[in-house]
Image (cartoon, rainbow, N blue to C red):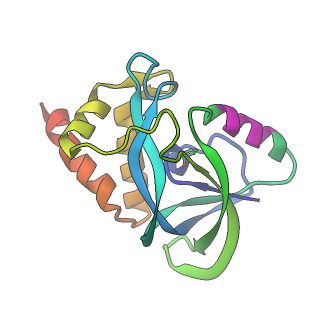
């Protein structure tokens, strides 16, 4: 089984895996449109984390993890619990790449957690400045929302991935960090 990480799982996979490879998911875009009442915020002051939106012309790069059969049930139970605030499981084709980000030609079915527009924690779009301020002020049991964005941005950069949404959001956050 392959599992696709496109948020915190890119830089902090919280489960044992057999191997990992960068992967591209076609037809979806990553957006910080999902409220986080339980990880990067609280029920009274939810943070903002990523989900995926269907968009035929777009692609989302992330990290694919091959999960060994042994312990798989527990890993999925833990992820289902962890992502209980609106995410659903999808099976989607992943285009695997090597460590340089070059596609290998191998396409596998991967498990992807997606929070769709109908879930109660979907908060959608606003200006980049508002989004950055929201992230700047939010903290939850898993830590500061800033860490989530900064670590994701660093992990994508180290993979050679340019995601304009994440780059723009980092640019909007930088003046707040510099203050
Ligand atoms: C992730 O890739 O970190 C992730 C994003 C949304 C739900 C589950 C995992």
Residue 78 belongs to magenta span: yes
Above or below — where is 162 with respect to 42? below
Toward the top, the furthest residue is 44
Residue 2 at x, y = what percent?
Answer: 71, 60
Determine whether, in the image, residue 115 is placed left or right of residue 162. Answer: right
Q: Quadrant of residue 68?
A: bottom right
Tally of numbered discs: 0
Determine whether, in the image, residue 92 is placed left or right of residue 114. Answer: right
Stretch in magenta: 74-81
Determine whether, in the image, residue 25 is placed left or right of residue 132. Answer: right
Residue 160 belongs to magenta span: no
Residue 132 at x, y = what percent?
Answer: 25, 38
Residue at 38% in and 20% down? 45
Residue 60 at x, y = what percent?
Answer: 46, 64
Above or below — where is 13 with respect to 163? above
Toward the front, the furthest residue is 118
Above or below — where is 80 with respect to 137? below
Above or below — where is 55 with respect to 124? below
Q: In the image shown, does 77 or 121 lie closer to the viewer?
A: 121
Report the quarter where the N terminus lies.
Answer: bottom right
Residue at 74% in and 57% down? 18
Residue at 51% in and 42% down? 118
Q: In the image shown, does 67 or 108 lie closer to the viewer?
A: 108
Q: Quadrant of residue 165?
A: bottom left
Report the quarter where the C terminus lies.
Answer: top left
Toward the right, the furthest residue is 70
Main SS category, magenta section? helix
Residue at 47% in and 33% down? 121
Residue 63 at x, y = what percent?
Answer: 56, 59
């Amino acid at each position: 089984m392959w599992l696709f990480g496109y948020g915190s799982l890119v830089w902090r996979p919280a489960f044992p895996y057999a191997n990992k490879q960068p992967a591209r998911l076609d037809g979806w875009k990553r957006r910080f449109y999902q409220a986080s009442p339980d990880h990067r915020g609280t029920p009274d002051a939810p943070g903002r984390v990523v989900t995926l939106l269907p968009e035929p012309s777009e692609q989302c790069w992330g990290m694919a993890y091959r999960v060994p059969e042994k312990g798989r049930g527990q890993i999925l139970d833990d992820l289902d619990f962890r992502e209980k605030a609106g995410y659903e499981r999808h099976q989607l084709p992943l285009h695997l790449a090597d460590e340089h980000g070059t596609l290998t030609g191998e396409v596998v079915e991967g498990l992807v957690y997606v929070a769709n527009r109908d879930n109660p924690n979907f908060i959608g779009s606003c200006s980049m400045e508002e989004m950055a301020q929201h992230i700047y002020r939010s903290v939850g049991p898993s830590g500061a929302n800033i860490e989530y964005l900064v670590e994701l941005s660093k992990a994508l950069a180290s993979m050679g991935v340019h995601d304009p949404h994440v780059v723009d959001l980092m640019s909007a956050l930088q003046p707040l960090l510099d203050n």
